[in-house]
Amino acid sequence: MVERFFTPKEANLILPKVKTLVEDILSKANQARSLMTILDVSKESEMKLIEINRQIQELMAQLEEIGCYYKDWSFDVGLVDFPAIIHGKEALLCWRSDEEKINWFHGYDDGYAGRRPITAQLIFS
């Protein structure tokens, strides 16, 4: 159950904190990828991977405490969704780490492929 709905303005106000967390998630994922390319997997590298996974989970939990959710399971672009009410229905404001602000939304069933631009009439705060 969603505990908080964001307006585009509210989501953009907390975006600096979200950006920092997502940068950390992507950095940790890159560290894990580097470790996984080592041909000789040692107990030490296995333990490092477990620790990196724990750190990524903690960073994602911090996003969830804010009220948004990390959605990029390939850890390539840093995708985050913010629950919102758009046209009277539950939807998701959608942000990628290479975007300066939140300009997109989609329905719960539409996913990233169904992103649509946030228009002036949707900004209600």
Image (cartoon, rainbow, N blue to C red):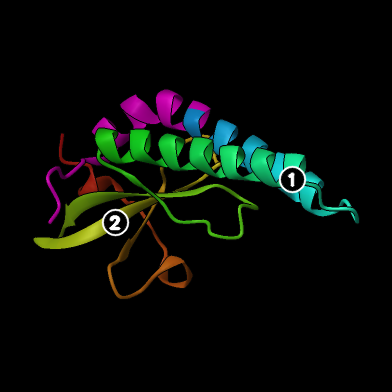
Which residue sits at x=15%, y=52%? 2
Residue 71 location (% of width, % of height): 45, 56
Which residue does the numbered mark 1 point to in the structure image?
43
Dot 1 crowding, Cα within 10 Å, few <14, some 14–19, many 20+: few
Q: Quadrant of the C terminus?
A: top left
Question: In screen coordinates, is 83 left or right of 16?
Answer: left
Tell me if I can see residue 30 in this picture: no
Q: Main secondary structure of the magenta part?
A: helix
Dot 2 crowding, Cα within 10 Å, few <14, some 14–19, many 20+: many
Which residue sits at x=42%, y=36%? 58
Q: Are marks 1 and 2 in contact (CB under 8 Å)?
A: no
- Asked whether 6 or 124 is in front, the reply is 6
- Quick one: SS at disc 1? helix
- Quick one: SS at disc 2? strand
- Asked whether 23 or 117 is in front, the reply is 23
Tell me the tag on residue 92: 2
Which residue sits at x=51%, y=35%? 55
Task: Choose mark 1 or mark 2, whichever is in front.
Answer: 1
- Asked whether residue 50 is drawn in magenta, I would say no
Residue 17 location (% of width, % of height): 42, 24
Q: Looking at the picture, does residue 45 appear above or below residue 10?
A: below
Tell me the tag on residue 84: none
Kindly indicate the quadrant of the structure image that contains residue 110: bottom left
Q: Which residues are magenta?
A: 1-20
Q: Amino acid at mark 1?
A: Lys
Tell which residue pokes out farthest to the front in this image.
Answer: 43
Q: Amino acid at mark 2?
A: Leu
Question: In screen coordinates, is 55 left or right of 90?
Answer: right
